[in-house]
Structure formats: C-alpha cells, structure tokens
Amino acid sequence: MRRTATNVPDYGNWVGPGLLYFPGGIGIALLLLSLEFFLLIIGAAISLAVFCYFAYARYEFSPVGGDLQARIRTLVLNHLEWNGQGSSLDIGCGNGALTIAVAQRFPRTHVTGVDLWGGGWGYSRQRCESNAKIAGVADRVTFHQASAATLPFHEGSFDLVVSNLVFHEVRAVRDKRALLEEALRVVKKGGVFAFQDLFRIREAYGDLYDLLETLRNSGIERVEYLDTGTSDFIPRPLRLPFMVGTMGLLYGKK
C-alpha cells in the first residue's frame, strides 16, 4: 500500500527549495540572455551546475532518495549507551524528527523537545505534535519553545540529552562552546549525551582537539568524537565543507 502525506511524518528537508529556485532561476535567465550576449553562457552553466548539485543533495536527504537525514539521526541513536530509563531532552527539535526517534527507540522514556521555531526552516510546534501523533508516540513527547542558549531547566534535569545540527544555527551565541556547556548542564551526573553539529568549523568551536581536551578535563566521565562526514553512507559529493564535511558527533557520559 502506498503511503500518503497523512500517515507519514513530515520532517522537512535540510536543502530548502530556495537553494534550487535561486540558482535555477538565475541560470535560466542567463541562458536566455546568452542568446544576445554569448559570454553569459558561462554564468548560466555555473548557475545551472549549482542548481543540479543542490537538487541532487535534496534528493539524497529525502526519504524517497538516500534518506540521509534519517540515517544521520540513526547515527546519533546508535551511539547512545543508555538503558532508556528516565527523562530525555532534544535541543533544537525542528519538526520533531529526533525527538520522535528517541521515543521510538526507547519506549520507557518521556522526551521533551525544545526549539525557537519560526525563521526560514518551516518548522513549528504544531508540526511536531502532528508528527508525533502520526508516529504513535504523542503520549510520550512534549514540545516547548525555548532557546538552546538558555534552557529553562534545572541543572541535571535529564538522563539523556541529544541535539542534531542545531548549535551552529544559534545566532545569539557566537562561541558555540557555550551552547555545549549549557546542554551538558542539564544532563544528570551519570547521564548520557549525543550532540551532532559542524564541530570542524573553527570559527564556531575553535580547535577540535582543544575542545575535546577541555570537555574531558571538565569532570565529564567520557567524551568521544566521530566524524559523521566520513561515514560510509555519506556520498562523496556531499562531503564538501558547506554540506556535511564538517559534521561530527560528540557523545559520552557525564
């Protein structure tokens, strides 16, 4: 039986349609103008090549293509050494994809998802709640509006804290290490965490090895790092720095 939009959660696509419309439109315009000014054919070719690249990326991220968004979420789940007992938090939940995935993987936990929503991503609390209902976990998830910079929870509130490609988007905080500190603050002692982000961007996190050393010297029991961008399931064309080439996973136990 073919699945329809009413019975499949909508988590969106990391490659928004604007990344296709803009270069595609410019490319077509330049192509038409090149009939009058031949040298514009070069700009048209470049713009259309950019369009083709992002169209390919959008397809690979989508469920009907490579389903890379789901596979990247699964990478987070597979690095959680947790028995599923207790409360959990998803920071920057977007449309609820990772929140729902945690609830499905660990049926004895209640998951809280937080996000500011709004902006250009098309995410919303309403979509989160609709997706949770479709996925059959609405009774074990809750969603609240909150910033990753100032989480509205007491220290050590959660047994599990996760986040997927969120911290680099928080414009209120330039040094993303502060966001890691805030996320770790709400993890219980002995609790586990997994944060996936663009950790190889020096402007955001500084030197990666210095970051890991700082975390390991902060009293956290265990911190590990995995280069997501080099995973076998990531196609080589998507390993570029502006796509997933700087992506990594920090995980461990507090």
Image (spheres, helix red, strand yellow):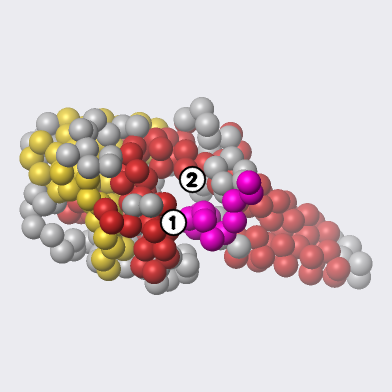
Single out the residue that lies furthest toward the top: 232
- What residue is pinned by disc 1? 134
Tag 1 near tag 2, CB within 8 Å: no
Residue 215 at x, y percent in the picture: 17, 38
* Residue at screen point 63% across, 46% down: 1
Q: Which amino acid does label 2 sit on?
A: Gln
Camera-nearest label, 1 or 2: 1
Left or right: 126, with 1 as reference point: left
Residue 144 at x, y percent in the picture: 26, 66
Left or right: 47, with 204 as reference point: right
Q: Which amino acid does label 1 sit on?
A: Ile
Residue 181 at x, y percent in the picture: 17, 50
Give the overall secondary structure of the magenta segment: loop
Residue 55 seen: yes
> Does 36 sit above or below residue 59?
below
Single out the residue that lies furthest toward the front: 1
Residue 95 at x, y percent in the picture: 41, 59
* Residue at screen point 66% across, 52% down: 55
Q: Label 2 neighbourhood size at 10 Å, few (<14), some (14-19), many (20+)?
A: some
Which portion, as a residue range, is magenta?
Answer: 1-14
Q: Which of marks 1 and 2 is nearer the N terminus?
A: 2
Q: Label 1 neighbourhood size at 10 Å, few (<14), some (14-19), many (20+)?
A: some
* Residue at screen point 37% across, 63% down: 129
* Residue at screen point 24% across, 30% down: 81
Which quarter shows the C terminus? Answer: top left
- What residue is pinned by disc 2? 69
The secondary structure type at the circle numbered 1 is helix
Left or right: 173, with 151 as reference point: right
The secondary structure type at the circle numbered 2 is helix
Number of marks: 2
